[in-house]
């Protein structure tokens, strides 16, 4: 799981480009899926919040101004990738 931002400022921003910069070689070139949950483990889609970006190719963005409460929850993301067991690259559960 990756959690590079917190819902301060404009919201919670977990962009794939930023995550790749901060964790070189850890995220596959073409993710098959993105999974987003609160840091407490609640799936993002069950929180009732609106999401500005929710994309396997772009990442995740929750903007505080788009929430009824005025604040996004704190989210974490992970990406499902094609597994290459021989190379031990990008293997997921």
Image (tube, helix red, strand yellow):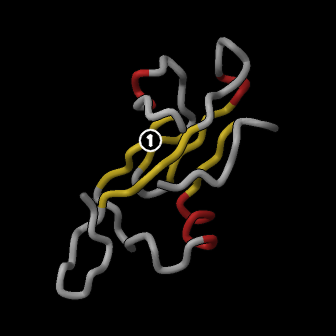
**Outermost residue, top side:** 68
x, y percent for residue 46: 40, 22
**Outermost residue, left side:** 86
Residue drawn where x is 65% and y is 28% of the image: 72
**Outermost residue, bottom side:** 87
Residue drawn where x is 73% and y is 18% of the image: 70
The image shows residue 92, relative to residue 20, as above or below, that is above
Q: Quadrant of residue 44?
A: top left
Q: Which residue is mark 1?
A: 36
Label count reads: 1
x, y percent for residue 8: 78, 37
Crowd band around label 1 with a 10 angstrom C-alpha radius: few (<14), some (14–19), many (20+) = many
x, y percent for residue 84: 21, 78
Q: Quadrant of residue 62?
A: top right
Q: Is residue 46 rendered to the left or right of residue 59?
A: left
Residue drawn where x is 46% and y is 37% of the image: 37
Q: Nearer the viewer, residue 1 or 7?
A: 1
Q: Nearer the viewer, residue 22 or 59?
A: 22
x, y percent for residue 52: 57, 35
Q: Is residue 39 rendered to the left or right of residue 91?
A: right
Residue drawn where x is 52% and y is 45% of the image: 76
The image shows residue 68, relative to residue 93, as above or below, that is above
Q: Quadrant of residue 19?
A: bottom right
Q: Nearer the viewer, residue 57 or 14?
A: 14
């Amino acid at each position: 799981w990756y959690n590079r931002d917190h819902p301060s400022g404009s919201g919670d921003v977990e962009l794939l480009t930023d995550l790749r910069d901060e964790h070189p070689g850890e995220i596959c070139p073409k993710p098959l899926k993105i999974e987003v949950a609160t840091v407490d483990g609640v799936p993002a889609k069950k929180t009732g919040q609106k999401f500005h970006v929710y994309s396997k190719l772009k990442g995740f963005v929750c903007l505080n101004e788009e929430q009824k409460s005025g604040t996004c929850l704190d989210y974490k993301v992970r990406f499902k990738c094609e597994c290459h067991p021989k190379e031990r690259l990008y293997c997921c559960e």
